[in-house]
Image: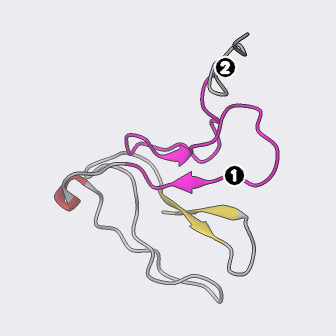
Amino acid sequence: MTQPQTDPYANGVCPFGEDEAPGSGCIKPKGHDGAHLVTPGDVDDDEALCPSEFPGDDMHTGQLCTRPRGHHGTHSCTEGISGTSYTREITWA
């Protein structure tokens, strides 16, 4: 007797960390347990991304905006928190 196949992605992909870059965000199934596994997404051409650089603070400096070039509103990027499995979204004007 064969076991029925269950698709862990039947309910979709976890929406955590999604942004404008195609394929960005957590790549685990929606409703997963444990830490997120975030990917920055697929950007074929660095020229397609906004060139704005985060001005810096005591924990982050030099991160680049991951939104498309010419976007409106604040700049943003998602960065890992060193020594943990957590991320944080950084935004700036």
Q: Is residue 53 shown in magenta?
A: no
Q: Give the range drawn in magenta.
A: 12-41
Q: Tell me where residue 31 appears, x and y as whole percent.
A: 77, 32
Helix, strand or loop at label 1? It is loop
Q: In which quarter of the image is residue 75?
A: bottom left
Assess disc 1: are there few (<14), some (14-19) or many (≥20) residues with their C-alpha within 10 Å of its C-alpha: some
Q: Is residue 27 shown in magenta?
A: yes
Q: Find residue 11 and name its label.
A: 2
Relative to 65, 46 lies left or right: left
**What amino acid is found at the position of numbered circle 1 in the picture?**
His
Q: Tell me where residue 34 appears, x and y as whole percent.
A: 81, 51
Spatial separation of the CA atoms under disc 1 and disc 2 = 16 Å
At a point 48% along the width and 63% down the height, the residue shown is 93
Compared to residue 85, the image places residue 21 above or below, namely above
Helix, strand or loop at label 2? It is loop
Q: Find residue 36 and name its label.
A: 1
What colouring does the structure picture have? secondary structure
Q: Nearer the viewer, residue 20 or 91?
A: 20
Q: Which of 69 and 93 is in front in this view?
A: 69
Looking at the magenta stretch, what is its main secondary structure? loop
Assess disc 2: are there few (<14), some (14-19) or many (≥20) residues with their C-alpha within 10 Å of its C-alpha: few
